[in-house]
């Protein structure tokens, strides 16, 4: 099965540089890997971290001869490669003082034709649109989400919390890292959205769902999402990747 896909990133209305990165990379047969990363650090260091994460993971994917065939294989592949990426970023920062403390979030979707495996670190998210209902597949590694999870803060209050963007886990900031990884079914007429927090901080989930359900092209959906985030302030970089598994009679395009 072939997916319809789109990837779009924008620096927003305030920041001078785009520290987000990502892409959608084809593999053998119907396999593909989608990645979104959101860098952080000193002057331009976030841009370095996110770019390194995406380019290193892309190289692993393009050079890989044996594609994952089972959920267990896919989960093991993503966990192993992302841990290697973490070490690459950590080692680079150690010998480049200007990049000390840099890191990046990452969210990945590995599609094999029969299932999709999701891996993430940080607060970049993955959503699944199924039968008109949008649900968040990933769980943010953030201070506020930890407070919500333990019952110390309501989800409503979390939306406007002053420390909303403090993350508890990132790639490259520590020598070792644990990756959240899971496999889900991905069926005809469903959409998968990967995005940085530049989108979710500015566009609520109900509005995201309505846009994704609109009878417009994937390119238009991605553009509208980014336009609304910018209209609502655009203080952060904004990145979206959308994957669509069309009905069998539909035609796919990239």
Image (tube, rainbow, N blue to C red):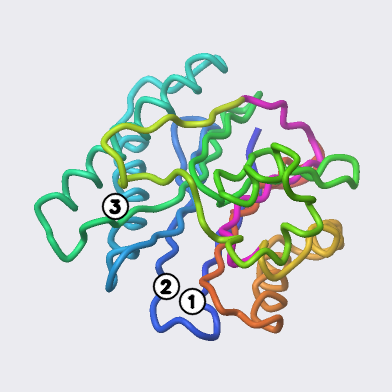
- Dots 1 and 3: beta carbons under 8 Å? no
Disc marking residue 195: none
Q: Secondary structure at mark 3?
A: helix
Residue at mark 1 to residue at mark 2: CA–CA distance: 5 Å
Label 2 sits on a secondary structure element that is loop
Residues at circles 1 and 2 in contact by the CB criterion of under 8 Å: yes
Does residue 64 lie above or below 213 as drawn?
A: above
Left or right: 209, with 67 as reference point: right
Residues at marks 3 and 2, CA–CA distance in whole angstroms:
14 Å
Residue found at the very far left of the displayed protein: 95
Residue 52 tag number? 3
- Residue shown at 74% from the left, 50% from the top: 153
Indicate the quadrant where residue 184 lies: top right
Q: Which residues are magenta?
A: 183-199
- In the image, residue 27 sits, relative to residue 159, either above or below, namely above
For the residue pair 8 and 3, the one nearer the viewer reads as: 8
Disc nearer the start of the sequence (1/3):
1
Which mark is first along the chain, 2 or 1? 1
State the CA–CA distance, disc 1 to disc 3: 18 Å
Q: Position of residue 91 (x, y in %)?
A: 17, 44
Element on which disc 1 rests? loop
In this picture, residue 247 sits left or right of residue 105: right
**Mark 3, residues whose alpha carbon is within 10 Å: few (<14), some, or many (≥20)?**
many
Q: Quadrant of the N terminus?
A: top right
Q: Quadrant of residue 41?
A: bottom left
The residue sitting at the right extreme is 132
């Amino acid at each position: 099965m072939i997916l319809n896909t789109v990837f779009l990133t924008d620096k927003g209305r305030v920041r001078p540089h785009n520290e987000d990165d990502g892409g959608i990379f084809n593999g053998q047969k119907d396999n593909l890997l989608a990645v979104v990363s959101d860098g952080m650090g000193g002057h331009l260091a976030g841009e370095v971290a996110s770019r390194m994460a995406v380019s290193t993971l892309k190289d692993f994917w393009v050079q890989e001869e044996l594609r994952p065939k089972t959920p267990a294989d896919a989960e093991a592949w993503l966990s192993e490669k992302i841990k290697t990426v973490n070490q690459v970023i950590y080692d680079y920062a150690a010998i480049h003082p200007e990049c000390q403390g840099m890191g990046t979030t990452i969210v990945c979707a590995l599609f094999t034709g029969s299932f999709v495996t999701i891996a993430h670190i940080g607060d970049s998210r993955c959503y699944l649109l199924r039968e008109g209902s949008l649900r968040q597949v990933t769980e943010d590694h953030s201070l506020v989400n930890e407070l919500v999870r333990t019952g110390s803060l309501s989800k409503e209050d979390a939306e406007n919390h002053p420390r909303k963007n403090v993350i508890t886990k990132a790639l490259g900031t520590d020598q070792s890292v644990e990756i959240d990884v899971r496999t889900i079914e991905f069926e005809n007429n469903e959409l998968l959205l990967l995005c940085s927090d530049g989108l979710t901080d500015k566009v609520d989930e109900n509005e995201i769902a309505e846009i994704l359900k609109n009878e417009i092209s994937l390119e238009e959906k991605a553009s509208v999402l980014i336009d609304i985030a910018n209209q609502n302030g655009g203080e952060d970089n904004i990145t979206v990747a959308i994957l669509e598994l069309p009905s069998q009679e539909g035609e796919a395009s990239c």
